[in-house]
Amino acid sequence: MKQTSIKQRVMRRVYGVWFLRSVLPVFTLEIGAFVVSLSIIKNLVFVERVIANALTSSFGNPFKIITYGISAFFGTSVSIQLISLVLIAGTIFFIRDIYRSAVSYALLKHVSRV
Protein backbone atom coordinates (compact mmCIF):
# COMPACT_ATOMS: atom_id res chain seq x y z
CA MET A 1 0.00 0.00 0.00
CA LYS A 2 1.19 3.49 -0.76
CA GLN A 3 2.01 5.95 1.99
CA THR A 4 -0.49 8.50 0.64
CA SER A 5 -3.27 5.92 0.53
CA ILE A 6 -2.72 5.04 4.19
CA LYS A 7 -2.61 8.72 5.11
CA GLN A 8 -5.87 9.39 3.27
CA ARG A 9 -7.61 6.50 5.01
CA VAL A 10 -6.38 7.64 8.41
CA MET A 11 -7.42 11.23 7.77
CA ARG A 12 -10.90 10.13 6.65
CA ARG A 13 -11.31 8.14 9.84
CA VAL A 14 -10.07 11.06 11.93
CA TYR A 15 -12.60 13.31 10.21
CA GLY A 16 -15.35 10.72 10.73
CA VAL A 17 -14.62 10.47 14.45
CA TRP A 18 -14.45 14.25 14.75
CA PHE A 19 -17.75 14.60 12.90
CA LEU A 20 -19.52 12.02 15.06
CA ARG A 21 -18.24 13.50 18.32
CA SER A 22 -18.52 17.22 17.72
CA VAL A 23 -20.76 18.06 14.76
CA LEU A 24 -23.45 15.38 14.78
CA PRO A 25 -24.75 16.14 18.30
CA VAL A 26 -25.04 19.84 17.41
CA PHE A 27 -26.87 19.03 14.16
CA THR A 28 -29.21 16.71 16.05
CA LEU A 29 -29.99 19.35 18.65
CA GLU A 30 -30.56 22.04 16.02
CA ILE A 31 -32.83 19.82 13.93
CA GLY A 32 -34.77 18.80 17.06
CA ALA A 33 -35.29 22.43 18.10
CA PHE A 34 -36.33 23.30 14.55
CA VAL A 35 -38.89 20.48 14.41
CA VAL A 36 -40.33 21.37 17.83
CA SER A 37 -40.59 25.04 16.84
CA LEU A 38 -42.27 24.16 13.55
CA SER A 39 -44.80 21.93 15.28
CA ILE A 40 -45.64 24.69 17.77
CA ILE A 41 -46.02 27.23 14.94
CA LYS A 42 -48.17 24.76 13.00
CA ASN A 43 -50.56 24.45 15.93
CA LEU A 44 -50.76 28.18 16.67
CA VAL A 45 -50.75 29.73 13.18
CA PHE A 46 -52.82 28.89 10.13
CA VAL A 47 -49.76 28.83 7.87
CA GLU A 48 -51.73 28.20 4.66
CA ARG A 49 -53.72 31.42 5.19
CA VAL A 50 -50.58 33.43 5.98
CA ILE A 51 -48.93 32.27 2.76
CA ALA A 52 -52.09 32.91 0.73
CA ASN A 53 -52.40 36.41 2.19
CA ALA A 54 -48.72 37.11 1.53
CA LEU A 55 -49.04 36.06 -2.10
CA THR A 56 -52.23 38.08 -2.52
CA SER A 57 -50.71 41.21 -1.01
CA SER A 58 -47.59 40.98 -3.14
CA PHE A 59 -49.33 40.25 -6.43
CA GLY A 60 -48.80 43.69 -7.96
CA ASN A 61 -45.43 44.39 -6.37
CA PRO A 62 -43.22 41.48 -5.25
CA PHE A 63 -41.37 43.71 -2.76
CA LYS A 64 -44.59 44.17 -0.79
CA ILE A 65 -44.11 40.67 0.59
CA ILE A 66 -41.36 42.13 2.81
CA THR A 67 -43.70 44.75 4.28
CA TYR A 68 -46.39 42.08 4.67
CA GLY A 69 -43.96 39.83 6.52
CA ILE A 70 -42.89 42.63 8.85
CA SER A 71 -46.46 43.72 9.58
CA ALA A 72 -47.59 40.12 10.07
CA PHE A 73 -44.68 39.50 12.44
CA PHE A 74 -45.43 42.54 14.58
CA GLY A 75 -49.17 41.87 14.41
CA THR A 76 -48.91 38.50 16.16
CA SER A 77 -48.57 37.61 19.81
CA VAL A 78 -45.25 37.72 21.62
CA SER A 79 -45.10 33.92 21.85
CA ILE A 80 -45.40 33.55 18.07
CA GLN A 81 -42.75 36.22 17.59
CA LEU A 82 -40.36 34.40 19.93
CA ILE A 83 -40.93 31.07 18.24
CA SER A 84 -40.41 32.70 14.85
CA LEU A 85 -37.14 34.21 16.06
CA VAL A 86 -36.04 30.78 17.33
CA LEU A 87 -36.80 29.32 13.88
CA ILE A 88 -34.85 32.06 12.12
CA ALA A 89 -31.89 31.79 14.49
CA GLY A 90 -31.91 28.00 14.28
CA THR A 91 -31.90 28.13 10.49
CA ILE A 92 -28.99 30.57 10.50
CA PHE A 93 -26.99 28.43 12.94
CA PHE A 94 -27.75 25.27 10.97
CA ILE A 95 -26.54 26.84 7.72
CA ARG A 96 -23.44 28.11 9.52
CA ASP A 97 -22.67 24.63 10.88
CA ILE A 98 -23.13 23.01 7.47
CA TYR A 99 -20.76 25.58 5.98
CA ARG A 100 -18.17 24.98 8.72
CA SER A 101 -18.37 21.22 8.25
CA ALA A 102 -17.98 21.53 4.50
CA VAL A 103 -14.96 23.83 4.90
CA SER A 104 -13.40 21.48 7.47
CA TYR A 105 -13.92 18.53 5.19
CA ALA A 106 -12.45 20.40 2.23
CA LEU A 107 -9.41 21.36 4.29
CA LEU A 108 -9.05 17.78 5.48
CA LYS A 109 -9.12 16.53 1.90
CA HIS A 110 -6.51 19.13 0.97
CA VAL A 111 -4.26 18.19 3.91
CA SER A 112 -4.61 14.49 3.21
CA ARG A 113 -3.39 15.03 -0.39
CA VAL A 114 -0.24 16.84 0.69
Image (cartoon, grey):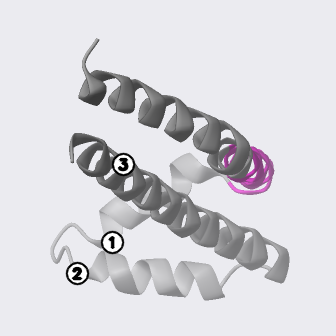
Residue 47 magenta? no
In the picture as drawn, the residue positioned furthest to the left comes out as 60
Residue ID for mark 3: 108
Q: Residues within 10 Å of mark 1 (few under 14, many from 20)?
A: some
Name the one closer to the observer, 35 or 57: 35
Name the quadrant of the N terminus: top left
Nearest to the eye among marks 1 and 2: give it: 2
Q: Which residues are magenta?
A: 28-45
Q: Which badge, 2 or 3, is on the more N-terminal residue?
A: 2
Query: In the rendered structure, which amino acid carries the disc numbered 2?
Result: Phe
Separation of marks 1 and 2 at Cα, in angstroms: 10 Å
In the image, taking residue 66 as reference, residue 31 lies left or right, namely right
Give neighbour class at mark 3: few <14, some 14-19, many 20+ (Cα, 10 Å).
Answer: some
Q: Does the residue at mark 1 contact the one at mark 3 (Cβ under 8 Å)?
A: no
Circles 2, 3 touching at the beta carbon (< 8 Å): no
Type of the residue with mark 1: Ser
Q: Position of residue 110 (x, y in %)?
A: 24, 49
Question: Which residue is label 1 attached to?
Answer: 57
| Gap in angstroms between the C-alphas marked 2 and 3 | 42 Å
Pointer 1 or 3: first along the chain? 1
Q: Report which quarter residue 90 is drawn in.
A: bottom right
Q: Is residue 42 magenta?
A: yes
Tell me which numbered mark, 1 or 2, is placed earlier along the sequence. 1
- What amino acid is found at the position of numbered circle 3 in the picture? Leu
Residue 36 in percent (x, y) is at 79, 47
